[in-house]
Image: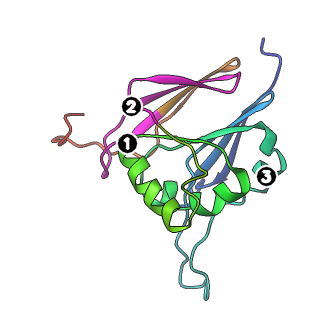
Amino acid sequence: MPKEKLKIIPLGGLGEIGKNMMAIEYGEDIMVIDCGLMFPDEEMLGIDLVIPDISYLVEHQNKVRGIVITHAHEDHIGALPYVLPQLNVPIYCTKLAKGLISGKLKERKILAQTKINVITPGSSFNLGRHFGVEFFPVCHSIPDAVGIIVHTPAGTIVHTGDFKLDYTPVSGL
């Protein structure tokens, strides 16, 4: 039996399109999957962007070990320039996602203080004491998209990210 409770905390994207962000917490470790924004609908006059509520992460920032990105669409990376100044944690993503994220962070003048780790699909790494993380390739409308397998003391979580079934994929997936 695990000593701690595994917590899965959706911070955005659940039941809506956009603002994708989920925290996984076990013991003294929190990892975040995706950090997206949502574009406002017509009733949100004067609003340019909608980002997830990260107050829980800010409150527990000493436990946040990093942000893992599934792919480089705005609804998965667009909030990074607004979230990173408050959390200052490393990012783990694929090569294409790094390129697009770097451009956003450079524009906001926060690239120099951000650590971006490129992870290739099929490889794994540890995040904190309690998370073993693996990337696996998925087919999506943007190249270099991945799903994420998170090994925890309480069990394994498979987070597919966004994917599509493509009978003639360019990448062979």
Which quadrant of the figure has residue 67? Answer: top right
Q: Which mark is residue 58?
A: 3
Q: Nearer the viewer, residue 66 or 19?
A: 66
Q: Which residues are magenta?
A: 118-147
Name the outermost residue toward the top: 1
Q: Nearer the viewer, residue 58 or 166?
A: 58
Q: Say few, some or many: other residues with alpha carbon within 10 Å of mark 2 (under 14 / 14 to 19 / 20 or more).
A: some
Q: Is residue 42 magenta?
A: no
| Residue depicted at 17% across the width and 43% down the height | 170
Q: Nearer the viewer, residue 97 or 146?
A: 97
Q: Which mark is residue 120?
A: 2
Which quadrant of the figure has residue 68? Answer: top right
| Residue depicted at 83% across the width and 17% down the height | 3
Mark found first going from the N terminus, 1 or 3: 3
In this image, 155 relative to 120: left or right?
right
Mark found first going from the N terminus, 1 or 2: 1
| Residue depicted at 30% across the width and 46% down the height | 143
Are the residues at dot 1 and dot 2 in contact (C-beta closer than 8 Å)? yes
Instruction: Residue 29: give x, y in percent of width and height.
Output: 74, 31
For label 1, the residue is 95
| Residue depicted at 61% across the width and 88% down the height | 46
Instruction: Residue 58: give x, y in percent of width and height.
Output: 79, 52
Instruction: Residue 115: give x, y in percent of width and height.
Output: 56, 43
Image quarter hosting the C terminus: top left
